[in-house]
Amino acid sequence: MFSLIQSSSVIGMSSFLVRVEVDVSNGLPGFEIVGMASSEVKEAKERVKVALKNIGITLPPKKITVNLSPANIRKTGTALDLPIAVGMLAAMEMIPPDSVENALFVGELGLNAELKFVRGILPSVIMAKEHGIRKCIVPKVNVSEGSIVRETEVIGFENLVDIIDYLVNGKTSDTKCYTVQTDPDQILASGRNIRNDDFEDVYGQEGVKRVAEIAAAGFHHFMMVGPPGAGKSMIARRIPSILPPLSMKESLEISQIYSIKGLLSEENPLIISRPFLAPHHTTTTKAMTGGGSNRVQPGIISMAHRGVLFLDEAPHFSREVLEVLRQPLEDKKVEVSRIGGSFIFPADFMLVLACNPCPCGYFPDRNKCRCTEYEIQRYRAHLSGPILDRIDLCVSANKISIDELKGMGKKPESSAKIRERIQVARKMQERRFAGTGYTFNSEIGSGVIQEYCKMDAPAQKLLEKAYEKLALSARAYHKILRVSRTIADLDESEKICANHVAEAIGYRLTDK
């Protein structure tokens, strides 16, 4: 007998439909899995046989062939255990053939026939919906994640016995199946009420907070330079609190990345706040970009998609790790090439760098700093020109005075107040870029930058003078224009004025 079960497998960032074809026929007894299966997929043969034995089902002494179609794409992971088992039961006529039609089966089997957690359920259910499949059978621990997708029935089970009962008898009061009524909009809205680290906790460093506000408004990359203990890390960790809330589209994009990494759970089936990634300086290039030999997965850069990637003590990162950021900063994506092909992962993030002015951190205070000129130059050389040229804003984080530390000045602004101004600037960008494919000022292409960054005469004259005096590159010129556009948006000004350009030039410390 022959049976066909629909399942899915994940490759890179996408899930594709896998047709599990099972044939049970007379011949020399055996069990073969074909169709470009990885070693972990081939191991399903033993898991399925033992799981069926332990629930009282003995395989007949016949030739069993399982084909995973399409056979020209490599299948990885353990999610094909369940469809292989169900396909064998259907081929042996132990379950009705029509009970498996128009349904997607995904799950890993334990030796006791228990269904275990698998990665990539969210992209698999989204793919099923695109193919017109309206029912998905998944492990119980994955049902919350899958239920995020609207107009698709996601049913969870704890073990194979319950699935057999469901397929044979249908859904009855005794059937041990689990469904979750999930409202993604409500889950997303709940994230807006969570109090993150707030800017009202940061005393002093008004200049750095101003740069953080500009960066958040236009999604610009920026760098902070200052001695240890000046509050650089403290400010960086509060940037997500002033970024606008995630839209549903953004949340689903990020959640698919985390689903493939296996980082979603029953309690948190959807990413509801902007990611903040702060890798250690010993992180490798493969960890940053993603990859792998058998299963290619997204890396830290992609996990920071639509959020913040913070590199503290940036010069201590290896040159290879820093240079690997160049492509994502320009293209908003990471391309990982392996023998099996090229895989593209999204990487639209805000890069925030923090570094000291010298190895000890206290230059130019020669009362504390004992670094030689050579040591200082070698330390700074870790940040190459091409990387610095991609940083829109650079600001000094100087030592905080005792009065600021004691809070003797005015009370710091809260993240909510700063976010209000940022949202006004974002609304202006939405109207400006409607139907263009751009979202933020930082994305404006050089070919159309004059159209979107209109300046008055004094601003034009000031920028021309700065271009000559500071010997700016064409890229630096455009960076200043984009930052000026964001500063003007924060002032709710349609035209860029001289004061906006002057402030933007002041943040080009990388040219000094």
Image (tube, rainbow, N blue to C red):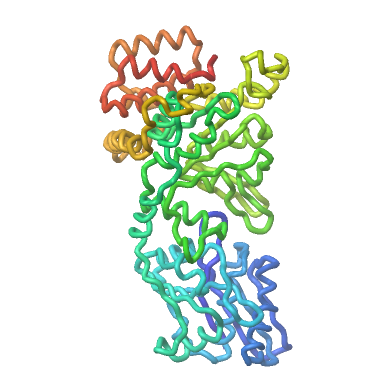
Image quadrant where one finds the N terminus? bottom right
Question: Which of the two residues, 74 or 401, is positioned nearer the viewer here?
Answer: 401
Left or right: residue 118 versus residue 374 is left
In the image, residue 481 above or below residue 181: above
Left or right: residue 446 versus residue 16 is left
Say how many tags the image has: 0
Image quadrant where one finds the C terminus? top right
Question: Which of the two residues, 407 or 229, is positioned nearer the viewer here?
Answer: 407
In the image, residue 419 above or below residue 4: above
Left or right: residue 344 versus residue 280 is left
Q: Residue at image x 42%, y 55%? A: 252
Q: Is residue 63 visible from the viewing direction of this image?
A: yes
Q: Residue at image x 32%, y 27%? A: 452
Horizontal and vertical percent for residue 119?
Answer: 56, 63
Horizontal and vertical percent for residue 197?
Answer: 45, 42
Q: Residue at image x 62%, y 32%? A: 313
Q: Is residue 446 visible from the viewing direction of this image?
A: no
Q: Residue at image x 36%, y 60%? A: 184
Question: Which of the two residues, 27 or 114, is positioned nearer the viewer here?
Answer: 114
Horizontal and vertical percent for residue 359?
Answer: 68, 24
Question: Which of the two residues, 388 or 203, is positioned nearer the viewer here?
Answer: 203
Horizontal and vertical percent for residue 109?
Answer: 61, 76
